[in-house]
Image (cartoon, rainbow, N blue to C red):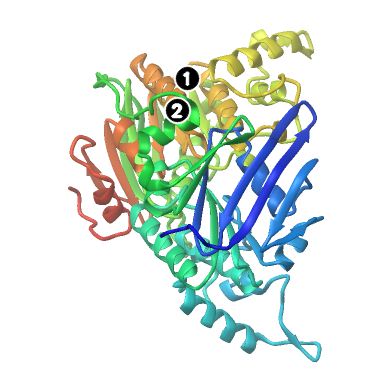
């Protein structure tokens, strides 16, 4: 689209935001034109999310101005931003699983007539919004029954229902398969055609180039440049972000060992009238092998990982780690024979957000002799170990004593990955190890996974980044509705092929 001459929907000028020990944004300038899709790209810790949270009223700038549709604004809360037509869809969805789609959409903005809830009016209005935006979803379905792509539509409908005409999307394609990404982009174009303005943060540069009208690059908390997609390609855009050539997940061929380190046989979770979230799953992972598992979220990958780790009860089947049958063993016992876990949700399962970095890298390792000093923790060794992880994984932080919540999401992820790899485990269950990290951090994590694999680590890799799965895996399994429905060779697999299997388009073994 030709953006010249368009009116300006959002203008940020000289934005500065400071936190204790950190300058998150400094002299940021951003101009977003009405009726366009404007992408914001940059490394982890570059200040992208802070900038969007400032625009959404989640915190106030220390300097600079925010102008929306020609009027300077001073937002004290998200309610103020919503009142002038700004809505935000966060990377981690904020939905109530036990409510219906309709209930989630109207929650907190319930329409009433003479003090009585007007469900009929709400349904009619949501149906009209869905038709105009191309975000069709069953309003009576429970959110717990929806896939991730449908949940995202619910989030978009939520902000549209509240009157948003400027939408901020944080990593909107992070967990979508290719077909769902296409559907999302179609929705975004529907919205723009209807007069909306879209701002979105993404690390997926090919998608940014495909859908954006303009792209702003942020580095070290400030604006580097704004470019048109036709004037750059993936490589040049990546160099603007990080000042270096883009990494690739593809590496040298691995030499898969003959020793089986993880054997899962007939594993089933759920029975006795319960839906089987994992249904008779069997596979093996050898020494120096990465087995990738592809699947749309909600098809049993989470429950499979928890069953392997002993975090959820199994109904049938067995789990063997090396020579040990651990089917009835505790999670602690499984960790003691060499299992590490990079969890699906770093906030809920992996990190203590209000605790300092050094306590987080110690988490789960308190019993190691080097961290024990009589009845106390050897804090000096814990601090030293944390700083080694910070250096090795290039975690951007003022020090090891700041709380985890002060780090960007990508730097939190690097800290978590570093912790789980630092023990030299035999088996690593890695769920979305590079989710939300920039291309530079991706390269570092990929290199560490390859190095550990080449030294004998067995890896179960779950990722929504299909290029990552294809590039790193020695074998790819596809999960659909709790079952392994395909076994694919990464040498011949494509993202489109994986997407077809992942959405149930074809369910026989390839």
**Is residue 363 visible in this depiction of the protein?**
yes
What quarter of the picture does the N terminus occupy?
A: bottom left
Residue 401, given in percent of the width and then of the height, sits at: 76, 21
Name the mark on residue 185: none
Number of numbered markers: 2
**Is residue 206 visible in this depiction of the protein?**
no
In the displayed structure image, the side of residue 50 where residue 21 appears, left or right:
right
Which residue bears the numbered disc 1? 425
- Element under label 2? strand
In the displayed structure image, the side of residue 61 where residue 7 appears, left or right:
left
Which one is in front, 481 or 403? 403
Q: Is residue 507 above or below residue 318?
A: below
Which one is in front, 334 or 96? 96
Residue that extends furthest to the front in the rendered view of this protein? 5
Q: How crowded is mark 1: few (under 14 residues within 10 Å), some or many (20 or more)?
A: many
In the displayed structure image, the side of residue 58 where residue 93 appears, left or right:
left
Which one is in front, 414 or 19? 19
Rendering quarter of residue 361: top right
Residue 500, given in percent of the width and then of the height, sits at: 27, 55
Q: Residue at x 33, y 58 (%)?
A: 503
Q: Is residue 153 above or below residue 60?
A: below
Residue 453, given in percent of the width and then of the height, sits at: 36, 20
- Element under label 1? loop
Query: Do callouts 2 and 1 mark residues in contact (Cβ within 8 Å)?
Result: yes
Q: Residues within 10 Å of mark 2 (few under 14, many from 20)?
A: many
Q: Residue at x 34, y 53 (%)?
A: 178
Name the mark on residue 428: 2
Rendering quarter of residue 120: bottom right
Residue 418, given in percent of the width and then of the height, sits at: 55, 22
Q: How far apart are marks 2 and 1 (CA)?
A: 7 Å
Q: In this view, does 426 lie above or below 104?
A: above
Which one is in front, 23 or 449? 23
């Amino acid at each position: 689209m030709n953006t010249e001459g368009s009116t300006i929907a959002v203008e940020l000028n000289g934005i500065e935001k400071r936190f204790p020990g950190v300058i998150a944004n400094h002299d940021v300038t951003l101009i977003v034109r009405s009726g366009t899709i404007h992408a914001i790209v940059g490394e982890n810790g570059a200040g992208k999310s802070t900038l969007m949270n400032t625009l959404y009223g989640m915190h106030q700038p220390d300097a600079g101005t925010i102008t929306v549709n020609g009027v300077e604004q001073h937002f004290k809360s998200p309610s103020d931003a919503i009142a002038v037509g700004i809505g935000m869809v966060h990377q981690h969805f904020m939905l109530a699983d036990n409510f219906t789609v309709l209930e989630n959409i109207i929650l907190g903005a319930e329409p009433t007539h003479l003090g009585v809830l007007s469900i009929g009016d709400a349904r009619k209005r949501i149906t009209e919004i869905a038709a105009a935006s191309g975000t069709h979803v069953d309003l009576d379905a429970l959110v717990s029954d929806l896939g991730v792509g449908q949940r995202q539509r619910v989030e978009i409908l939520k902000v549209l229902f509240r009157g948003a005409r400027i939408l901020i999307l944080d990593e909107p394609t992070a967990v979508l398969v290719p077909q769902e990404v296409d559907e999302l982009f179609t929705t975004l174009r529907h919205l723009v055609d209807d007069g909306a303005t879209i701002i979105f943060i993404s690390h997926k540069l090919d998608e940014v180039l495909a859908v954006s009208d303009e792209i702003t690059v942020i580095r070290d908390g400030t604006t580097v440049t704004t470019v048109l997609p036709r004037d750059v390609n993936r490589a040049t855009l990546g160099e603007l972000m990080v000042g270096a050539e883009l990494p690739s997940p593809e590496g040298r061929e691995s030499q898969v060992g003959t020793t089986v380190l993880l054997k899962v046989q007939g594993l089933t979770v759920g029975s006795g009238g319960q839906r089987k979230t994992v249904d008779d799953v069997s596979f093996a992972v050898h020494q120096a092998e990465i087995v990738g598992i592809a699947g749309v979220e909600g098809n049993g990958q989470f429950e499979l990982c928890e069953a392997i780790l002993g975090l959820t009860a199994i109904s049938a089947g067995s789990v063997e780690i090396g020579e040990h049958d651990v089917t009835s063993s505790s999670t602690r016992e499984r960790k003691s024979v060499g299992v590490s876990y990079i969890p699906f949700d770093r906030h809920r399962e992996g990190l203590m957000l209000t605790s300092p970095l050094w306590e987080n890298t110690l988490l789960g390792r308190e019993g190691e002799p080097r961290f024990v000093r009589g009845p106390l923790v050897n804090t000096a060794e814990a601090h030293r170990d944390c700083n080694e992880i910070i250096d090795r994984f290039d975690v951007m932080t003022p020090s090891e004593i700041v709380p985890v919540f002060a780090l960007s999401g990508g730097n939190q992820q690097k800290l978590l990955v570093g912790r789980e790899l630092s023990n030299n485990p035999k088996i690593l269950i890695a769920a979305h190890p590079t989710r939300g990290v920039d291309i530079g951090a991706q390269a570092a994590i990929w290199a560490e996974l390859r190095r550990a694999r080449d030294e004998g680590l067995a890896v179960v890799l779950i990722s929504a980044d299909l290029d990552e799965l294809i590039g790193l895996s020695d074998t790819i399994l596809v999960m659909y509705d709790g079952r392994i429905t395909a076994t694919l060779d990464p040498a011949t697999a494509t993202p489109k092929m994986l997407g077809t299997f992942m959405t149930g388009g074809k369910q026989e073994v390839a």
